[in-house]
Amino acid sequence: MNVTVTLNGAPVTDDVTPDTTLYEFLRAHGCKSVKCGCETTNCGLCTVWLDDAPVLSCAVLAVRADGRSVTTLEGLQDQSARLARCLAEQGAEQCGFCSPGLVMNVLAFERELAGRVPADEEIRRFLAGNLCRCTGYMSQMRAIKRYLGCPDPGAWPGAAGASGPAAAGTAARPAPVPVAPAKEVPTHER
Amino acid sequence: MSANDKHSAPVCSRAPLTKPAAAHAYANEAWPATSSFELAQQITPELAQVSHPVVKKDAYALLAGKPLYTDDLAPSDALVMKILRSPHAHARIRAIDTARALRVPGVVAVFTHEDVPHTRFTLAGQSNPEASPYDRLILDEVVRYVGDEVAFVVAETKRAAERALRLIRVDYEVLPAVLDFTQAKDNPVVVHGEEGYEVKAGWINNERLRNICAQGGSASGDLDAAFAQAEVVIDRTYHTKACAQAMMETFQSYAYVDVHGRIVCVSSTQVPFHIRRQIATALEIAPSQVRVVKPRIGGGFGAKQTGCAETFVAFAAQRLGRPVKVVYTREETMTASNSRHEMQMHVRLGAKRDGTIVAIDLDTLSNTGAYGEHGPTTVGLSGHKSLPLYGRALATRFAFTVVYTNTMPAGAYRGYGATQGLFALESAVNELADTLAMDPCELRVRNLTREGELMPQYDNQVLYSTTLERCLRRAQEMIGWNEKPLVRDMGDKVRALGVSLAMQGSCILNVDIGSVDLRLEEGGFYVLSIGATDMGTGCDTILAQFAAEALECPVERVVVHGVDTDVSPYDTGSYASSTTYITGAATLKAAEQLRGQMAETAAGWWGVDAADVRFDGERVFVPAVRADGTVDAEAAPAHEMALAAFANKCVSGGRGDALTAHAAQWSEFSPPPFMAGIAEVDVDKATGKVDVVDYVGVVDCGTVVNTNLARVQAEGGIVQGIGMALTEDVQYDERGRMRTRSFMSYKLPCRQDVPSVRVDFVPSYEKTGPLGAKSIGEVVINTPSPAIASAVAHATGHYVRTLPITPEKALFGEEG
């Protein structure tokens, strides 16, 4: 079937089988930022915009995009730069594999907010479908809150408490206590 | 309960114990007057590049979605491999009919066990000789779990390959299977009875015909005498489940034959040098005929410390002479790769009524699944990286058995057995505190191993650096421990606190090797070539920080390159929390060497003594000297050359060389990092649902090399640990088919599940580590399970001893 899509602003036409997903279509047309993490619409890695609304491209057939516009991170390099900086300054990209999907969804969220500053729980809810296994989400939250202009984004590099060693505990260091050596010693090879 | 009726078990009799080693000489040294905490406070503020929040070198490319991962880089004409997998937990293949599959347009080849070499190997990414038995073939006549590989289809397109898969007819002789790991030992079903099975490391005491992959133990002190002193004995059995590492990038690899006829395999792996050996062994070719390249990796967490499909694509590319790629689906990654080892741990903990721990006995049974990758080694950490927390106990004993079953093989997963052992030991310590009605933090402080003490269950190493007590105090302060009761009724919910400590190692001592090449290039910049594998953790960046610190330059001046086994210097790989401690030290050594070479070179040009040549990062110079021989910093230097001019001169004029240093590091120490974690949970009175409303973790990883990345490691590890504690559970049906095949049925924490995770650091200064550093990568996953289990017990009165802590278990108890 012939499909014509406006991909990142340029028309693309291709002959696809009816079961081709938008994810497959986009990868085949060079949009390698679009990743697949689960195939079951749980992870958010394949998030792209279909007519400016975020969709999971692994669950959209390519033919559904016929005559419509699709935006991937390849088409938002300038628009995503400031968010990228907020994330990078927190180390929040880590392995980076979930980053493109997250960036696409945060930018969609930002547009939906239209300048309004969201509450934390609202951010978490909107982005709940963007899984990340590396970061535990906290650094992403700090970065996104900063990006969206939320008050108190939390620990920021250079800010007090962000990195300084905490001086806690007052117990004096006791004298070494001899301990009987092991009778048997384990092998630590691994 | 009295002590005497609780310690009747005989001394480990199943297998000979490993041989004792002499106590380390350092134990006799006078202990320094300055603590590692004070040292850290003195030294760390002096650092210019280390202990700073440096942005990862690859951050902006990753955040821009550039094509950097294995599947992004595969040649567009690569053939696609799809794999037919066993529907049976245990079966022998009588016959395979591939004729119809081969007729599908676009199908290039179908391979079965009849096509592959018959040398067994292990997929465990371990130093040679591996502790894991050689118990695999690329494709085998016997399949040993549901998901085991039966045949490879290689085709021009994914669709053709998938179509062909459905047309392969396999005649199986279905065999009885052993699925319950507590029934595996001496079961009539033998998982590995085949010829060609090989054990490379005798110490594992393998008895495969009894389904025993490995067994052994270690002991310290007189256990019976110590238990005789105990006034309270906690005698419990704990059970941790298999968990999926669930890195976001599934397993993916491609291979091709290069211009010299060699196999090149590009793969998402943590262990390129070990993969080279696996491919050479499996394909029965010389190691010189294999090259392995690691691009960016979308997470590993240990999963990629085990080979996966590298040998498959290498074999197919070799046979077909064309590039072949395989990209695992999430379902394949869940069901046919590797997971955390499921373990059952029997703990006996003897203590005085004042809370002094006198004896600990730990017996671990581990399920390695159908193949033995990392089986013999993960289990060791369940004892050796839990018991040393309380090294003051008069006696400890640790015994272990690792069994084969017809379930998916286990492998490496962040924490590597320590996670399991610490759930058992720290839960027992929490139960002891509750039994004695003692504050669980105070009980721990009473028993902690102190600086300068020997750790008998930790290769008799001396503990040089720890701030664990301060970490615990800081965690208490952060959560408001002293202002809150352990349990509070909130109406519909009960809110409660629970605590846990954790430790890990910083390398595999006397096994891990890290090496680097460091070159001064024309133009005045450095190339740091490494064999360590950045899997998203940021080791490329932190190694550059070490080099920049020693070379007194910005991190940007150090270019990092890795990993290509033809080019990169040898490194055992990124695992065992070793990269910072081992490869970091190698980097510092190389930088010092390079400075020496620069001084020698300049001294030769200027006709001075190399000892008089200085380098401040920007210029090489010889300072002016006054008549009395002292340096005159005000006067113009006697000789001076800017770095770029110096580097250019090294390679100009038809002579010279780009100065290159090479350094390797191994270690006879593996200093433990420590962590204290406190969970604050809400348990719903009606449903039993457990919400972690706040979690604080405080880490002693020695010098915090990159303050950002260490924080993210800790936050990420805690959330993975929360998943293990509450929802993550690899489950099978009664026929051995995995139920948890996707993220629909295997629940990872999403951001709504973890509203607040707070991390802080109390660095010690580890004198054997590079600029005082230890490790961070693994220790951070170990506290959540025991801390949350204890909080739930405080809330409900139910100790959940089998993970995960489901609402049913929380509400009704495990006997429910």
Image (cartoon, coloured by chain):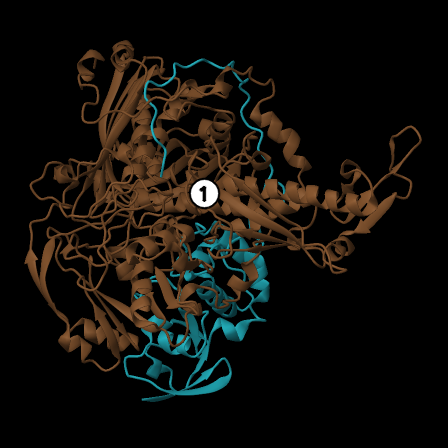
Chain colours: A cyan, B brown
Q: Secondary structure at mark 1?
A: loop
Looking at this view, is A99 or B375 the one in front?
Answer: B375
Q: Quadrant of the C terminus of chain B?
A: top left
Q: Nearer the viewer, residue B628 or B560?
A: B628
Which residue is at the far right? B627
Q: Quadrant of residue B236?
A: top left
Of all chains, the one bearing label 1 is: B
Q: Residue furthest bottom?
A: A2
The local crowd at label 1, few if under 14, some if 14 to 19, many if 20 or more residues have their Cα within 10 Å, is many
In-image side of B610 versus B300 (left or right): right
Q: Position of residue B380 (x, y in %)?
A: 31, 33
**Image point (19%, 17%), residue name:** B6
Q: Is residue A69 above or below residue B620?
A: below
Question: Residue B74: x percent and y percent?
Answer: 41, 70
Residue B235 is at least partly visible in this image? yes
Q: Residue furthest front?
A: B654
**Residue indicated by mark 1:** B777
Relative to residue B310, is residue B31 drawn left or right?
Answer: right
Q: Is residue A178 above or below residue B168?
A: above
Residue B339 as seen in the image, left or right of residue B757:
left
Rendered location of residue B603, percent (x, y): 78, 43
Query: A73 or B125, which lies in front?
Result: B125
Residue at the spot x=36%, y=13% of the render? B354
Q: Is residue B214 above or below residue B455?
A: below
Looking at the rendering, in which quadrant would you find the N terminus of chain B? top left
Percent x, y of residue B709: 53, 47
Q: Amino acid at mark 1?
A: Gly
